[in-house]
Amino acid sequence: MLLEQIKQVADGLAKTFAPFCEVVVHDLLDPSHAVLAIHNNLSNREVGHPATELGLARIMDPEFEQVIANYPNRFADGRQVKSTSIGIKDSEGRYIAALCMNIDLTMFQGFQGMLNQFVAMPVNAPASETLDPAGTDAIRARIDQFAARLATTPRALKAGDRRALVQELKAAGLLDLRRAMETVAAHLGVSRASVYSYAK
């Protein structure tokens, strides 16, 4: 029954993170044929394949770490993988299964390479200019820091938090910079009138 529930969890995770994440359910009570289910198959394994080294380690040692998250791994063809393995115990504390997720990093690394190339600019560019009034970067950075402290984004700040933020900017002298009110309003996604009211 428990294994069937784990298979449902695996199916949900696989659908959520498709196509980048392989999700595998291992039956550790049958290590020779441990792979019970495999979704978004990226490793070319099949149902009935044997347990991995981690699975065998859990079978041998009930005290083996239950959650091992984001460890480096590699598929048989050399692709880099980020893996997480979660051991499942029965009521007696014995490992009976494992739920494993393997994220293929090659596509993300490709995206990263393309983005790095796109944003790269020559060191000795023939010209440079700014289309942004001086000081606006400092205002935006301060707003971003404030929102990060609250584990949110600037545009998701509540009215009370926006008021506290604007008062903080005012105390730091950042509202005295040219086009400060417009910059704050644009970054928060509110009207300039709102920013003026927060600053009072």
Image (cartoon, rainbow, N blue to C red):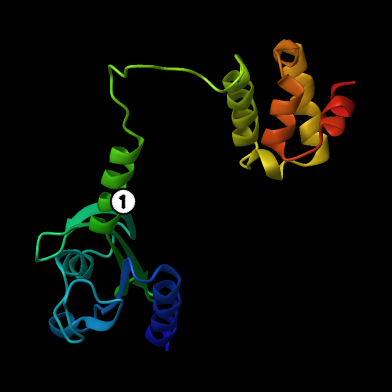
Quarter assignment of residue 55: bottom left
Using the image as rendered, state which of residue 64 and residue 51 is in the foreground: 51
Quadrant placement of the C terminus: top right
Residue in view at x 21 percent, y 71 percent: 59
What amino acid type is highlighted by mark number 1? Phe
Q: Is residue 93 left or right of residue 144?
A: left
Q: Quadrant of residue 84?
A: bottom left
- Residue shown at 20% from the left, 81% from the top: 34
- Would you call the spot at circle 1 few (<14 residues within 10 Å), some (14-19), or many (20 or more)? few
- Residue 67 position (above or below residue 4): above
Residue drawn at the location 18% of the way across and 72% of the way down: 43
Quadrant of the rendered image containing residue 79: bottom left
- The N terminus is located in which quarter? bottom left
Residue 114 vs residue 37, the one in the foreground = 114
Where is mark 1, residue-wise?
A: 111
Where is residue 185 shown, x and y percent of the image? Answer: 74, 32
SS state under label 1: helix
Rendered view: 5 above or below 58: below
Apparent side of residue 119 relative to residue 53 in the rendered image (left or right): right
For the point 81% across and 36% down, which residue is it? 191
Is 112 placed above or below 148 here?
Answer: below
Residue 167 placed where, x, y %? 79, 21
Residue 190 image point, x, y percent:
78, 39
Left or right: residue 107 compared with residue 134: left
Q: Is residue 185 visible to us here?
A: yes
